[in-house]
Amino acid sequence: MELIEKLQPIKKPLMVLGTSSGAGKSLTVTAIGRILKNLEEEPIPFKGQNMSNNAWVDWNGGEMAYSQALQAFACGIIPSSEMNPILLKPQGNSISEVIHLGKSAGITTAKNYYKDWFIPGWEVIKKGLNSIYERHPNCRLIIEGAGSPVEMNLIHRDLTNLKVAKYLEANCILVTDIERGGVFAQIIGTLELMKPEEKKLIKGIIINRFRGDLSLFEEGKKWIESKTQIPVLGIIPWLDDKFPPEDSLDLLERKANIINPEIKVGIIKLPSISNFSDFDPLENEESTLIEWIKESQNLNQFDFLILPGSKQTIKDQLFLESSGLSKNIKEYSKTNGNIFGICGGLQMLGTILEDPFFKEGSIGDSEKLTKGIGLLPLKTTFLQKKITRQINSESIWPNLTEINGFEIHNGETKLDRSQDTCKTKPIFKDLDLGWYKENIQGGFIAGTYIHGIFENDDWRDHYLNLIRKSKNLPLLDKKTRSYKIKRESIIDNLANEFKKHLNISSLLT
């Protein structure tokens, strides 16, 4: 497709920039997307470049950041990788995998990224924009920036903030987080570092995460408007609903508010953890408490353990060994403990991890063949080509039900015939998607390649009921509210709160 050098959208795009990372850009785009959907507009989210291992796979097998998928859900549309044309997936040591329009394009160091990938990256961003506008000419893009738009050492090679804003002549909103402190300096400093033609694009300011009486900031609002000549469009109060963090470091900052939980889940905080949105359905279970485990400890306090996905399975397996967590997990398995692995977690539960092409974190020939934890008789070989696809299957265990989700992995996993495999059974009718076996003392060791497995309500209820039954707890009612319906309710609540405190009507020209 021939690229269009100058786009002329029918409806003025909105762009959400932030004074810093974590200012609230993602949630603001999510809320505005739902607000505009309710106004019967055609909003479409867009983020030119994102850096995250929390990914989603579209219906064409393309990878994109989960935050843009969530924003698409808020807009009432099916996510597509063109909404996030560049995804950088960190692998540690300042190395990232580069995803262009859903497909792996190569590996780069941070030092070489802007030298080697800036020009092709900008073309990919324009291609994503053109693709959206060709299919949705009447849409209104809701664009998310990344980090701060005025990192002066990077601004000349920043692909996804002011370059996109100027290219589309977008109406820009500057979001700042008052919870962090220094909100006046954040706003004034950010605007002062912009060029005059960039500052003109800023049409409004949002103060995010305000605690207490909003009227107490009225004088502050007047000062900001007088100093900047830019209207404060809204002061958004602190909101308690849980949303997926983009950065895995944020996981440790999420505080549980469940008192006397019936089920306690421990999730191993792997250094290269990926796809942690897999556990949002568990976080939204009213009787289930999640705790993140990052160091060796007695694990018997947990009703079940989860080994999550990993961007670097070999590296994370070596971490489990060196930290003592591998030993802890084996000891836990000797009780009636339940263990569940997803993707890389499934691979680590096996006996052998073979990495002939150095795809999953092995450093030299000595690490091409690595022992897994050894709780399932499975051998994984990491291949050159990644598998990315949506999944529609049917489970055999713990019940017969339809399953939806997606795969993102390099490895091919088979039963290790050098081990006793007679007690290991497939979880799904598609036999290579997951396996389980019963512990000697009761409980189950299981794992699957399917991300989003816990979003399947019937499957999740039956799995949790295995554990509830072992604790003599009443079984979950099969009529419990669907997680996806609950997610919609959370997005609606977010949008309603923003709508109460935010006026963007002047920007919808």
Image (cartoon, rainbow, N blue to C red):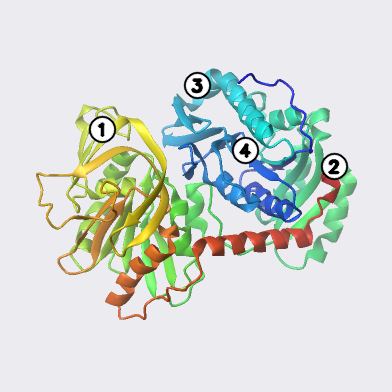
How many C-alpha atoms fall within 10 Å of the one at disc 3: few (<14), some, or many (≥20)?
few
Circle 4/circle 2 CB separation < 8 Å:
no
Q: Foreground mark, 1 or 2?
A: 2
Q: CA distance from mark 4 to mark 1?
A: 33 Å
Looking at the image, is mark 2 or mark 3 earlier in the sequence? 3
Q: Secondary structure at mark 2?
A: loop
Q: Amino acid at mark 3?
A: Asn
Q: Amino acid at mark 4?
A: Lys
At horizontal 38% and vertical 72% (from top left) the residue drawn is 263
Which of the image's four quarters has the C terminus? top right
Q: Which residue is mark 3?
A: 112
Q: Amino acid at mark 1?
A: Asp
Q: Which residue is mark 2?
A: 509
Looking at the image, is mark 4 or mark 1 earlier in the sequence? 4
Q: CA distance from mark 4 to mark 3?
A: 22 Å
Residue 474, can we see it?
A: yes
Which of the image's four quarters has the N terminus? top right
Q: Secondary structure at mark 1?
A: loop
Residue 118 pos. (x, y %): 58, 22
Q: Which mark is residue 355?
A: 1
Looking at the image, is mark 1 or mark 2 earlier in the sequence? 1
Q: Which residue is mark 4?
A: 47
Question: In terms of depth relative to the viewer, which is nearer, 329 or 32?
Answer: 32
Q: Tell me if residue 455 comes above or below residue 71 in the rendering.
A: below
Q: Tell me if residue 300 comes above or below residue 170 in the rendering.
A: below
